[in-house]
Image (cartoon, grey):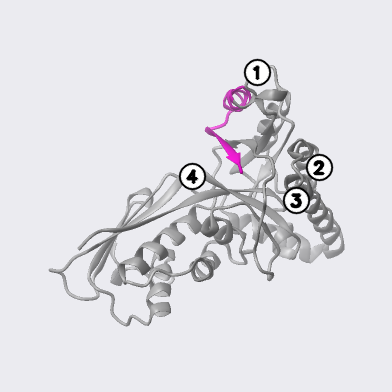
């Protein structure tokens, strides 16, 4: 039998992190330079129901039966089986690889889930729709993030920029003029669930203050959508700076992120902000296209970020 494989990209949040958990809009985009991949191979000589999992990125090699039911990979597999009404999976080997940084706010968990769900449903002869893939991946996201907004599984599944409001139908964004983002990895692992939990506790103590901050973040996301769809990406720079200031007030920045944000601005970025849960992970910087710059600004900003301590940089185009 042939192999069945599927991949899914990483993601960055451009605007609206944390506030999106509380019903405000957010904008996210796929990062195609990093990917999760799942490959399913039939094992006809093995007993029915034996699913062997290989996930070298997390040092895992085990049979599905030996994993806790609440393990994210086991949950993704069980979700597909339940969705398709398969009581006993055919014997197979599932291999999962990923180049997406872990605990860095780039959607690694969602991408792995989406890749598994797609590859396994194809292996079972019934590839699932994007809507169902995203819904199943969201159930796994609950294990990763506790109270996820749903934005990660949405943008990773559809692999296109999205405007997202929790509980509302997903809206894909029409990017009138593509623009370039430089991503800087602080090198500090920061599980999103921890950051989201910390913000929730602070919100419970000072609900009025945090609701006002979330309102301001949501308004910025609305203005950013207008700029993107009207072909005015240069307006996104000041909005990024403003969004970052609000995230500082929400208390999710860190010295490492601040250093990278300042380095990007000093190197000529039009705007910069942390991206994702914060307290580590990644930041992003908007750079001027070559036609507006005396030099290729993206490589210069990327170099400045590495000199300021970034563990890695990625240059990606949002289109």
Tag 4–tag 2 contact (CB < 8 Å) = no
Q: Select label 2 or label 3 by which is in front.
A: 3
Residue 287 at what x, y percent from top left? 68, 31
Quarter of the figure that contains the C terminus: top right
- At a point 23% along the width and 60% down the height, the residue shown is 2
Residue assigned mark 4: 101
Residue on which disc 1 sits:
295
Q: Position of residue 283 (x, y in %)?
A: 64, 39
Q: Residue at x 77, y 66 (%)?
A: 204
Decide which of 154, 232 is in the foreground and name it: 232
- Crowding around mark 2 (Cα neighbors within 10 Å: few <14, some 14 to 19, many 20+) is some
- Whichever of callouts 3 and 1 sits on the residue coming sooner in the sequence is 3
The quarter in which the N terminus is drawn is bottom left
- Reading the image, the residue beneath label 2 is 242
Mark 3 to mark 1 CA distance (whole Å): 28 Å
Residue under label 3, please give it.
Answer: 225
């Amino acid at each position: 039998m042939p192999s069945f494989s599927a991949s899914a990209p990483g993601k960055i949040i451009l605007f609206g992190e944390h506030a999106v958990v509380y019903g405000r809009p957010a904008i996210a985009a796929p990062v195609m330079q990093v990917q999760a991949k799942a490959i399913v191979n039939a094992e006809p000589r093995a007993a029915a129901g034996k699913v062997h999992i290989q996930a070298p990125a997390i040092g895992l090699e085990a049979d599905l039966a030996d994993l806790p039911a609440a393990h994210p990979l086991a949950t993704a597999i069980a979700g597909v089986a339940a969705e398709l009404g398969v009581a006993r999976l055919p014997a197979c080997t599932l291999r999962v690889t990923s180049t997406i940084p872990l605990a860095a706010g780039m959607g690694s968990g969602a991408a792995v889930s989406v890749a598994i769900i797609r590859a396994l449903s194809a292996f079972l002869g019934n590839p699932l729709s994007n809507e169902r893939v995203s819904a199943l991946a969201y159930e796994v996201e609950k294990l990763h993030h506790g109270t996820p907004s749903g934005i990660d599984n949405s943008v990773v599944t559809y692999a296109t920029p999205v405007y997202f409001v929790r509980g509302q139908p997903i809206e894909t964004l029409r990017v009138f003029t593509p623009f370039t983002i430089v991503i800087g990895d602080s090198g500090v692992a920061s599980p999103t669930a921890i950051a989201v939990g910390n913000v929730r506790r602070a919100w419970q103590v000072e609900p009025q203050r945090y609701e006002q901050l979330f309102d301001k973040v949501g308004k910025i996301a609305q203005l950013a959508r207008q700029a993107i769809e009207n072909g005015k990406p240069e307006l996104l720079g000041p909005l990024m700076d403003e969004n970052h200031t609000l995230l500082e007030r929400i208390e999710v920045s860190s010295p490492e992120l601040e250093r990278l944000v300042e380095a990007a601005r000093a190197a000529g970025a039009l705007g910069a902000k942390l991206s994702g849960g914060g307290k580590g992970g990644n930041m992003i910087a908007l750079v001027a296209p070559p036609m507006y710059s005396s030099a290729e600004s993206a490589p210069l900003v990327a170099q400045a970020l590495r000199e300021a301590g970034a563990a890695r940089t990625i240059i990606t185009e949002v289109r």
